[in-house]
Amino acid sequence: MFYWVMKRIIVGPILNLLFRPWVKGLDNVPATGPAVLVSNHLSFSDSIFLPIVVPRTVVFLAKSEYFTGKGVKGRLTALFFRLSNQLPMDRSGGAASSSSLSAGMDILNDGGVLGIYPEGTRSPDGRLYRGKTGVAKLVLATGVPVIPVAMIGTDKVQPIGRRIPNIRRVGVIIGEPLDFSRYEGLEDDRFVQRSVTDEIMYELMRLSGQEYVDAYASTVKERLAAEKAAGRKTPRPGADTRRAAVRISNDAGSPAPGAVTEIGGAPSEKRPATDDGPGTPGAAAGPA
């Protein structure tokens, strides 16, 4: 009830009036049945604008820290997240993350729509970073439709660290469902998980037009934070780890979506099979 009141009566109408979000490909979201919306992650406001433009209820897996805060502010934050259909996501890996993914599976088994950010956290600089394989584990285990979503301009509306948003238009591009049925029965194969994740990231890159960096956004953020604490001048995020970052053009010569499993680096099957925490909206709401 709280979700629909906020979406239909309070928050939704105000944001539609101020930001006039545009959307393409809305018919790619199934009217009924389970589906996973996989999106790039540019801003805190992604988790607000995406549910507004999608007619169905979208449940996000939010980082668990938002549900364990102390004091009055922490309790109010946790209450808000629960009332707005967000579930806690433990990003530490291992059994804790697997348990969090089970909560996502429950939503899908009940026929719901689940929202996931494969990068695991917001981009530090507007570029697209390597996806974590948690999203692949989830979609391979459930076999539900995977709908790629590109958020456009939300990083300009609310850059990292800014609490009061800039008033400007934002966009949402919803791509055609991705089919991974060819991997049926291989959901526990880590090479398959990486291949599926890379295919998802390729499609997000194609839809969003973002430059791809072959590094985890969380790793880049940790390095930047350490360099800042040490008082060193920081290079552009991802500059030392990027291998042939790619832009996708719309001409006829562009590769077909999902045609590669290598994005900006060494072929995925040669990567160490030691991935990954779940690619979830670790910063799905609130600053990372």
Image (cartoon, helix red, strand yellow):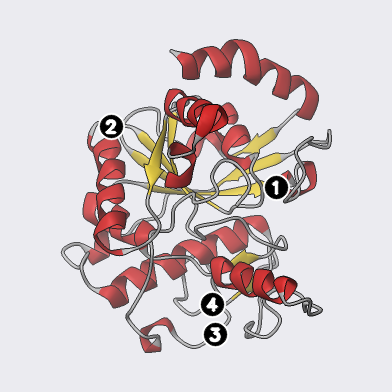
Count of numbered badges drawn on the protein: 4
Residue 7, how many percent across, how many down?
56, 19
Kindly tell me whether residue 91 is visible in this rendering.
Answer: yes
Circle 1 — which element? strand
From the viewer's perspective, is 268 left or right of 97?
Answer: right
**4 or 1: tag closer to the N-terminus:** 1
Q: Residues within 10 Å of mark 2 (few under 14, many from 20)?
A: some
Residue where numbered disc 3 is placed: 265
Question: Against 243, is 131 above or below?
Answer: above
Inter-mark Cα distance, 3 to 2:
37 Å
Point 31% across, 43% down: residue: 104
Under mark 2, the amino acid is Gly
| Residue in the picture at 53% in, 48% down | 175
Question: Which residue appears farthest toward the front when viewing the image?
Answer: 71
Q: Would you name the residue on which mark 4 appears?
A: 263
Q: Is there any visible trace of residue 247 in the rendered image?
A: no
Which residue extends farthest left?
A: 185
In front: 176, or 211?
211
Judging from the image, what secondary structure is the residue with disc 2 in?
A: loop
In the drawing, does residue 102 fall left or right of residue 282?
A: left
Earlier sequence position, callout 3 versus callout 1: 1
Label 4, residues with CA under 10 Å away: few <14, some 14-19, many ≥20: many
Which amino acid is tagged 3?
Answer: Gly
